[in-house]
Image (cartoon, grey):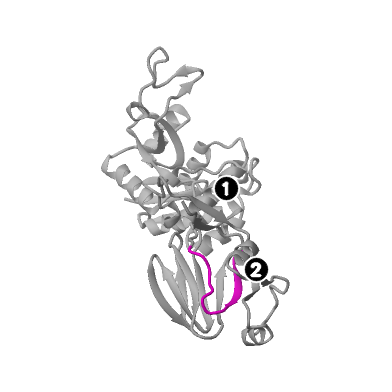
């Protein structure tokens, strides 16, 4: 069976300028579903369908094909049926699967499951939907609840089912029959129509500026699943969050704080150490950008920082000189010059200088990362 994927991507967009070319996580929006469709491995051909040749280059870079629709089918008055019919008139296929680029978090598993359901269920039309298990109205009338009865627990409600428009498919023969009979085929017309339920991030649909922000946050969460690790209130335990780096360093016993010479093209750690008064604790921030920071910290034996953790940031330390005792989740480790130590988020840790001479470490993190401390009862 010849199953072809088609990704419609107009150049114009009223609500978000050039939406399909807008970068999301460093890639044009249209590339996200293109790469996912490839990785799913269920299509004999994958096409970007657009009136603009700029998408030809994007398609080639993504390793897929380009179909240039007529300019007349690029306006706001062009319906889904019009450009689907044009496409199947020029690209032979038994089943056409339309994947919309405005659903960039559609997964490989979603696509494989969708195509499998289409084939195994012998559907003529298949649409993706999402379920909302909450009371719904249509034109002011209740859909799934009785306003004269007690509000039921939400888990007992029948969900309201909404089209997601992320992915849809048609058997080409049945689709043409519906076009001939009803001048419409998108919703299924006559034939067997099914509905494939999407969940979670896959249901994110980009229509407005806020949707881009939501998608970016979802991508960040997917890349870093530990952000979603649950934490709960514990009776009797209180915590305090500090974010100002100078305040944190001062509380750790460091009074000589230099943040005036950061972001120089090149510095030498040995020269910086040699030019400081190493009879007392000092610190100098070397790097401070929107993505990371690096701070050189020197302390005397017995000095260090307070027990804390970061709930949303991993940091690491390079031991420049001397010896330190690192306590991580209650386990103590001796570290020395040349060692690199990773502190994962949510792990309680503290470091203390040991030995008989000043110890120096390079702390690599980010400005204004929350330091969470336990408060004394």
Q: Is residue 294 visible?
A: yes
> In the shown orientation, is residue 66 left or right of residue 247?
left
Taking the image as drawn, is residue 186 in sight?
Answer: no
Instruction: Check the image and report above or below for 138 versus 286.
Output: above
- Expressed as whole percent of the image width and height from the top left, the position of residue 155 reads 34, 30
Q: Earlier in the sequence, mark 1 or mark 2?
A: 1
Depicted 133 relative to depicted 369: above or below: above
Q: Is residue 302 magenta?
A: yes
x, y percentage for residue 36? 43, 56
Contact, CB < 8 Å: mark 1 with mark 2? Answer: no
Tell me what residue is drawn at x 57 percent, y 67 percent: 252
Q: Please tell me whether residue 97 is drawn above or below residue 181 in the rendered image.
A: below
Q: Nearer the viewer, residue 274 or 123?
A: 274
Q: Residues within 10 Å of mark 2 (few under 14, many from 20)?
A: some
Image mark count: 2
Q: Secondary structure at mark 2?
A: strand
Q: Is residue 104 above or below residue 81?
A: below
Q: Is residue 99 magenta?
A: no
Magenta range is 291-307
Residue at which label 2 appears:
288
Work out whether residue 134 or residue 34 is closer to the camera in this orientation and state it: 134
Residue drawn at 39 percent across, 48 percent down: 93
Q: Which residue position is annotated with label 1? A: 212
In the rendered image, residue 61, in percent from the top left (x then y), is placed at 53, 64
Element marked by disc 1:
helix
Residue 142 drawn at (x, y percent): 44, 18
Q: Residue furthest right?
A: 260
Q: Residue furthest left?
A: 120
């Amino acid at each position: 069976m010849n199953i072809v994927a088609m990704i419609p991507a107009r150049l114009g967009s009223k609500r978000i300028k050039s939406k399909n070319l807008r970068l999301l996580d460093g890639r044009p929006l249209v590339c996200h579903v293109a790469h996912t469709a490839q990785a799913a491995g269920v299509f004999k051909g994958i096409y970007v369908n657009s009136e603009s040749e700029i998408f030809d280059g994007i398609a080639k870079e993504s390793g897929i094909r380009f179909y240039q629709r007529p300019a007349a089918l690029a306006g706001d008055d062009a319906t889904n049926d019009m450009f689907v019919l044009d496409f199947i008139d020029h690209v032979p296929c038994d089943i056409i699967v339309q994947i919309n680029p405005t659903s960039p978090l559609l997964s490989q598993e979603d696509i494989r499951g969708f195509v499998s359901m289409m084939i195994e269920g012998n559907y003529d039309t298949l649409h993706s939907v999402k379920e909302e298990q909450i009371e719904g109205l249509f034109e002011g009338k209740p859909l799934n609840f009785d306003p004269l009865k007690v509000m039921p627990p939400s888990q007992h409600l029948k969900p309201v089912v909404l089209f997601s428009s992320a992915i849809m498919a048609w058997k080409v023969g049945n689709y043409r029959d519906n076009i001939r009979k009803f001048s419409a085929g998108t919703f299924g017309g006559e034939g067997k129509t099914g509905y494939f339920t999407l969940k979670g991030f896959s249901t994110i649909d980009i229509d407005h500026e806020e949707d881009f922000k939501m998608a970016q946050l979802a991508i960040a969460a997917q890349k870093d699943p530990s952000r979603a690790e649950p934490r709960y209130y514990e009776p009797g335990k209180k915590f305090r969050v500090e974010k100002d780096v100078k305040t944190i360093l001062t509380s750790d016993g460091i009074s000589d704080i230099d943040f005036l010479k950061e972001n120089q093209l090149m510095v030498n750690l040995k020269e910086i150490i040699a030019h400081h008064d190493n009879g007392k604790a000092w610190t100098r921030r070397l790097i401070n950008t929107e993505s990371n920071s690096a701070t050189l910290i020197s302390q005397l034996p017995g000095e260090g920082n307070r027990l804390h953790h970061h709930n949303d940031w991993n940091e690491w330390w390079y031991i420049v000189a001397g010896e330190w005792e690192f306590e991580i989740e209650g386990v103590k480790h001796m570290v020395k010059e040349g060692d690199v130590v990773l502190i994962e988020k949510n792990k309680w840790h503290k470091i203390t200088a040991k030995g008989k001479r000043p110890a120096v470490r390079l702390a690599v993190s980010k400005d204004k990362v929350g330091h969470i401390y336990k408060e004394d009862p």
